[in-house]
Image (cartoon, rainbow, N blue to C red):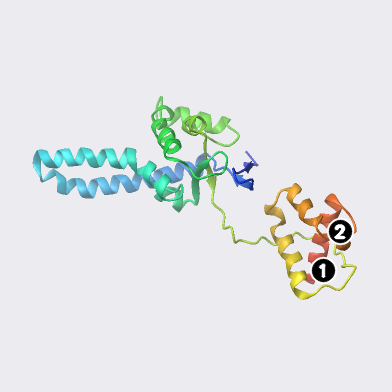
Amino acid sequence: MLDTLTLVETPEGIRLRLRAAGVMPRAAAWAVDFAVRVGVLWILGIGLMLLGETGMGLYLLLLFILFWLYPVLFEVLRDGQTIGKKALSLRVINANGSPVTWMGSIVRNLLRVVDMLPFFYGFGLVAGLIDPQSRRIGDIVAGTLVVHVGNPNQHLAAPQVPVVHAPIMLPADEQKSIVAFAERAQQLTVERQQELAALLPMLTESRGTLAVQRLLGMANAFLGRR
């Protein structure tokens, strides 16, 4: 799958471009979480086994917490990220881009049992390879999505396009604003790019895609490109 970008609109009306995580990074995150849980269980289990029947009861309680409550608590209380997901820069969210809810997290993790059938995530793997957003059965039923987490403050390089000289001399802060627009252009939808470009008709002297290209060209000129 070459493009896992998903455009969603949050309940607040904000458009987000989300990159759904594929099978491999999700499997890697699961492996990290599994290793963490087994490690904790092994370390604490040694001490609990020395307490006899009481220790055995506590061990079973610990086992339940680590393998059933661990993902739910982390996903809801830690912004959609277990330790493994945080290590792989992944996050669980609702399909509409909002934070995952208790119900959504519980459902997706309960259905992990189904995803693991008939052996070693067989159904989950097939569902992940078929679904355009690489969702396993638990995510499809719960209405959740696992996405890559990007740095919201990250600026991409402004795309290189033919230089366009501004029809008027612009002050430095306005030049910086146009460069900032060019640096964020790839993170915006085409509609949003055109919407922003339409705010400067006297500068672009055009509309739609051409207005966006002229702004990008001016940004290249301000950056000293030729």
- Say which quarter of the image contains residue 102: top left
Q: Is residue 16 left or right of residue 117?
A: right
Disc 2: CA contacts within 10 A as few (<14), some (14-19) or many (>=20): few
Q: Is residue 198 left or right of residue 185?
A: right
- In the drawing, does residue 163 fall left or right of residue 123? right
Instruction: Count numbered badges in the picture.
Output: 2
Q: Can residue 114 be spotted in the picture?
A: yes
Q: Position of residue 114 (x, y in %)?
A: 41, 27
Which residue is situated farthest in the top direction here?
Answer: 118
Nearer to me, 226 or 154: 154
Residue depicted at x 70% and y 61%: 183
Please report the residue visible at 15 percent of the width from the left and 39 percent of the height from the top.
56
Whether residue 24 is situated above or below residue 202 in the rendered picture:
above
Indicate the secondary structure of the residue bearing disc 2: helix
Q: Which residue is mark 1?
A: 221
Instruction: Please name the amino acid that badge 1 sits on.
Output: Ala
- The answer to whether residue 163 is above or below residue 210 is below
Q: Is residue 158 visible?
A: no
**Sequence-earlier tag: 2 or 1:** 2
Relative to 149, is 2 above or below? Answer: above
Marks 2/1: CA distance? 19 Å
In the rendering, which numbered label is found on residue 201?
2
Name the spot of residue 78 as percent of width and height, x first.
Answer: 42, 51
Disc 2 marks a residue whose amino acid type is Pro
Location of residue 196 in the rendering, given as x and y in whole percent from the top left corner: 76, 55
Indicate the quadrant containing the C terminus: top left, top right, bottom left or bottom right. bottom right
**SS at mark 1 in the image:** helix
